[in-house]
Image (spheres, helix red, strand yellow):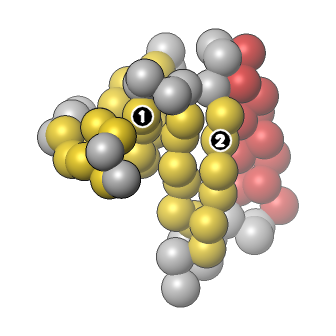
Amino acid sequence: MGHNSEQRCGGFEFRRQHRIGPYFADFCCIAQHLIIEPDGSQHPAPDEERKDGLRTAYLKQQGYRVLRFWNE
């Protein structure tokens, strides 16, 4: 289960581990419909890329923009 803690960045409120449908967004700014996803080393694997693609497509259908960054 997610922590759903709230933090501010640049004046915007972000929720950590915010549930959207069957998924949890790592960082979500509801007011801006923005999701930030730091991706780890497991994400380049073909199966993980496919899962990430399905997840991103779902989140976009819900009206969110998804930004992904490598967390190395």
Task: Using the rendered view, name the quadrant where residue 25 is placed.
Answer: top left
- Identify the element where label 2 is drawn: strand
Picture quarter with the N terminus: top left
Residue 55 visible from this viewpoint: no
Cα–Cα span, label 2 and label 1: 11 Å
Front residue of 60/21: it is 60
Instruction: Tell me which residue sits at (32%, 53%) in the image.
Output: 9
Say which of 1 and 71 sits in front.
71
Q: Is residue 26 left or right of residue 63?
A: left
What secondary structure is marked by label 1?
strand
Can the viewer see residue 71 in this picture? Answer: yes
Instruction: Tell me residue 33's x, y (percent).
Output: 54, 26
Q: Decide if residue 49 is on the left or right side of residue 21.
A: right
- Tell me how many marks there are: 2
Give the residue type that dot 1 points to. Answer: Cys
| Residue that numbered label 1 is attached to | 29
Pointer 2 residue:
66
Residue 61, percent across and down? 73, 15
